Amino acid sequence: MSPAARPPRADAARNRQKILEAARGQIAAYGPDAGMDEIAAAAGVAVGTLYRHFPNKTELVTAVVAQSVGALADETEAALARIKAGARAVDELSAFLHRVVEAAVTDKAVKAAARALGADVSGMGAEERGIAALNAIISAGQAEGDLNPDVTVEDMYLIFASAPTDQPPHARARWLSLILSGLTATRTAG
């Protein structure tokens, strides 16, 4: 087996995971501007170890954002599974939007991931999974007559990116209520 094909040693894999967890914590608290020295210290590794795993900060931030995109994709697929089991799509979409907005309040990595959908984390599969599930949720809501027929995944990106995460809970709830009323179809008596 060539050295390139050899799986990483157990300690190297543990260090990589510790670095990713520490970076996520630092980015959640301080945004993508979190320092590499602080990340290494939080991980309990030397700065050189951090740079062996992630040669530059962009690669480290991309890996953390990719994890967040993966978590969003998992969350979207779980909502779709509940719809397939009988839940209403509009209820699942509403709950999903609420969870994403509230998570982004304290976790800048989540907001960065939400904004990065479509950025340089493509090709890892998570973004594509999330898009497919979100499209299916939107289509289900439209088929049920609960969502406007012109709602798209791109609208969800705009919603994620513009969430008022710096506002108090009552303001975020009001914003989400207004957003949801714009997404839902109005029914006329007939």
Image (cartoon, rainbow, N blue to C red):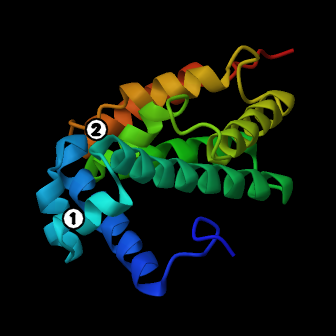
Residue identifier under label 2: 165
Lateral position of residue 116 relative to residue 22, left or right: right
| On-image quarter of the N terminus | bottom right
The amino acid marked with disc number 2 is Thr
At mark 2, the secondary structure is loop
The amino acid marked with disc number 1 is Gly
Lateral position of residue 190 relative to residue 186, left or right: right
Question: Which numbered circle lies on residue 134?
Answer: none
Residue identifier under label 1: 48
**Residue at the spot 27% in from the left edge and 35% down from the top edge:** 171
Determine the image quadrant of residue 13: bottom left
Crowding at mark 1 (Cα within 10 Å: few <14, some 14-19, many 20+): few
Compare residues 113 and 85 and report the one nearer the observer.
113
Q: CA distance from mark 2 to mark 1?
A: 35 Å
106 versus 152 height, above or below = below
Closer mark to the observer between disc 2 and disc 1: 1
Determine the image quadrant of residue 4: bottom right
Compare residues 162 and 114 and report the one nearer the observer.
114
Where is residue 151? Give x, y as percent. Answer: 67, 20
Where is residue 90? Give x, y as percent. Answer: 68, 39
